[in-house]
Amino acid sequence: MQKLFPGILFLACAAALPAAGNLEIYFIDVEGGQATLFVSPSGESMLVDTGWAGFNHRDAGRIAAAAKTAGVKKIDYLVVTHYHADHAGGVPQLAEKLPIRNFVDHGAQTETTRDAQVLYNAYIAFRDKGNHIQVKPGDVIPIKGIEVKVLSSAGDLIESPLPGAGQPDAECASFQRHEVDTTENAQSVGLLIAYGGFRMIDLADLTWNKEYGLVCPANKIGAVDLYLVSHHGMDRSGSPQLVHALDPRVAIMNNGARKGGAAEIWQTVHSSPGLLDLWQLHYAVAAGKDHNSPDPFIANVDELCEGKWIRATVRKDGAFTVYNSRNKYEKTYTKN
């Protein structure tokens, strides 16, 4: 198993890389799981999670199709944020379609059910064929051309604020804790992805109480340009304290038709003071019209869908364009 060196070394290396092209991010529809493909300006790729197993290889096929569109022939870094079926289930099927060089995760499985162990064993059978990188908060995943900072892993969080962050958060006084989460969700690998003037956060399924330590009593992260809505928009994550501290300009929710997209969480994100737009991979059936974004911002409007994706194309100056593959609608967001 390969351990990462302290993040400062990799940040220094990344800063020395030449700038070229754009960063492309594909938010792939895996029906309420996660599969997010990053293609660095260097040409290296990073996939965060693989969706579900089964469904006639549906999710692996959708990931492979998006990779082909992006010109990606291998996955340089596969980040498995945690060992749940909607995030790690598709690893064996994806490995049949695309070579995977490096497997990044938080370490050992923490759940003890038979199904959890079967899922984990299936994952490590393929992980052992590549290079394994176990990350801790503060590490940097060494993909060339972008900076990928680990914020959370194995239940731990970064201890010190990132550069420019650390301001007290007045909203923390009203935070209400949930029951302690003992599942793999609380172990999630959370990432901050930066390219030039652009910052994006993906906390996977990191749950409510764990989020608190990232933004309370002081905001350790600072503002972001793009927020991948935590936990598919389920009400176990995405507190107002987190969302308002991040102050995103754009949010993308990787919900399914009947998973995630909770009205309460949608409203929290939608009403965040600096938010310009909220994009969704699916229309959330249970939330109703008042708690779904307008049609142009939704990749899949029908419950039985074709798995359309959303793409963000990011320039080094921080401007980025979000594109909906269903209706070809796109919108550009310039850096303030």
Image (tube, rainbow, N blue to C red):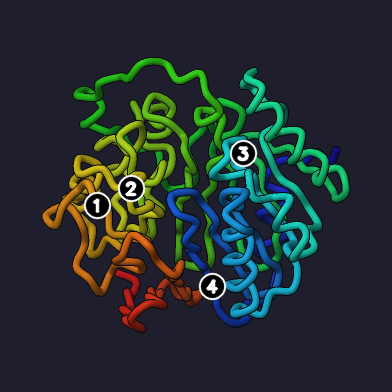
Instruction: Identify the residue shown where x is 72% and y is 40%.
Output: 6
Q: From the top left corner, tell me how far across and down residue 63 is, in percent.
A: 60, 65
Quadrant into which the C terminus falls: bottom left
What residue did someone put label 1 on? 285
Question: Are dots 1 and 4 in contact, CB under 8 Å?
Answer: no
Question: Are dots 3 and 2 in contact, CB under 8 Å?
Answer: no
Instruction: Identify the residue shown where x is 24% and y is 49%.
Output: 269
- Distance between the Cα atoms at labels 2 and 4? 28 Å
Q: From the top left corner, tell me how far across and down residue 245 is, in percent.
A: 30, 42
Local SS, label 4: strand
Front position among marks 3 and 4 = 4
Question: Are dots 2 and 1 in contact, CB under 8 Å?
Answer: yes
Q: Give the label on residue 206, or none.
A: none
- Crowdedness near tag 1: few (<14), some (14–19) or many (≥20) residues, C-alpha within 10 Å: some
Instruction: Identify the residue shown where x is 22% and y is 71%.
Output: 295
Quadrant into which the N terminus falls: top right
What residue did someone put label 2 on? 258
In primary-sequence order, the first of circles 1 and 4 is 4
In front: 120, or 321? 120
Question: Are dots 3 and 1 in contact, CB under 8 Å?
Answer: no
Local SS, label 3: loop
Front position among marks 3 and 1 = 1
In primary-sequence order, the first of circles 3 and 4 is 4
- Crowdedness near tag 3: few (<14), some (14–19) or many (≥20) residues, C-alpha within 10 Å: many
Specify the quadrant of the image occupied by residue 332: bottom left
Q: Is residue 179 above or below residue 5?
A: above
What residue did someone put label 3 on? 138
- Distance between the Cα atoms at labels 2 and 1? 6 Å
In front: 187, or 216? 187
